[in-house]
Amino acid sequence: MGETTQVDAEGEVRQAARDLDYDRYLAALLSPKAARLDLMAIAAFHGEIARVPVNVHEPTIGAIRLQWWRDVIDNRGSGEAPGSPVAEGVQRLLCADDKAVEDAISVIDAYEELLHPGALSRPGAVEAFATMGQGSVFRWAVRRLGIGAPQGSELIGAASQAYGRVQLMRALPGLLRRGHNPFVAPNTGDWEMITGVLIARTRAQMAEVRRLAPLAPAAIRDVILPVALVEPYLTALEGLGSELIDEQATISPLTRVWRIYVAKRLGRF
């Protein structure tokens, strides 16, 4: 690959991370320079996978799109270029980290579940979704920074549950518009109960994040920087009231930048 082509490819990875997983993009900007592009590739991969259920109506079409990424994973090291800078970056990372293969597949499995009505209705399903989705991305990034698995595992777990739930709630309007109701709630009252439980458990997990963060290596706190946005997201979600399932909760770009920067400097979430 020529120098110009390489620069263009890296630019596409950065842009994909910015467009598809802005929170992790911001966190990656504050990471060590040697790992920055790799963390953006991980963020872009997660963003590519996470957008499938909110962009397709037909589960079969969603499964086909996700299968393309499964093929990318299976073809790592084959020398066959997938034609996507993000996919090529992911393949390179997977070849350097065997455990990352499990993480990447887990992310795909998590979001494929959202294509099926009622997927998160069974006991423990939300916890599993957060662990498989956000948790796998956090663990992959932690290993890329050279941190061993046992270190900070409780913090990563709490961060995964808090951030996973808040992002699930933010995704609900898009999922419902595409006909993918993960809870099969038939009326407004049911949604108020479901989201109320999700919000309460998110705050409980955030309390754990705050308890555990001072005890963890700084590199792990850097990986979970997006969790600094959980409280602003929760405030936005609560502000929507009954419209929470119709309109995605957002916070301003300035708030996102500031909260992540403060969390980086002070180590507080």
Image (cartoon, grey):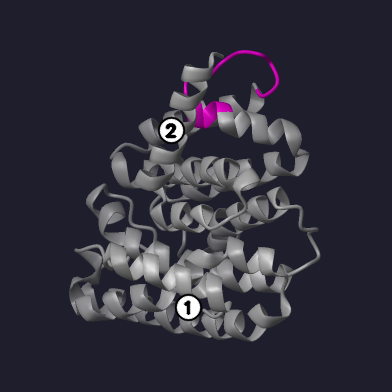
Image quadrant assignment for residue 212: bottom right
Mark 1 falls on what kind of element? Answer: helix
Magenta-colored stretch includes residue 79: yes
Magenta region includes residue 80:
yes
Q: Mark 2 and mark 1 in contact? Answer it, CB < 8 Å.
A: no
Q: Which residue is mark 2?
A: 11
Q: Secondary structure at mark 2?
A: helix
- Start and end of the magenta stretch? 76-88
Q: Residue at 21%, 76% (x, y): give it.
A: 240
Residue at the spot 56% in from the left edge and 14% down from the top edge:
1
Residue 26: quadrant of the picture: bottom left
Say which amino acid is labelled 2. Answer: Gly
Which of the pair 141/173 is nearer the observer? 141
Q: Is residue 54 above or below residue 212?
A: above
Residue at 22%, 74% in the rendered image = 188
Residue 260 visible in the picture: yes
Residue 111 rendering spot, x and y as whole percentages:
47, 48
Q: Residue at x 50, y 70 (%)?
A: 227
| Residue 101 place in picture, x, y as percent | 69, 39
In this rendering, would 235 be left or right of 266? left
Judge whether 29 appears above or below 212 on screen: above
Q: Position of residue 231 (x, y in %)?
A: 40, 79
Could you say where residue 45 lies in the image, as x and y percent from the top left?
50, 40
Which amino acid type corresponds to the residue marked 1 in the rendered image? Thr
Q: Which mark is residue 202?
A: 1
Figure disc tally: 2
**Which label sits in the foreground, 2 or 1?**
2
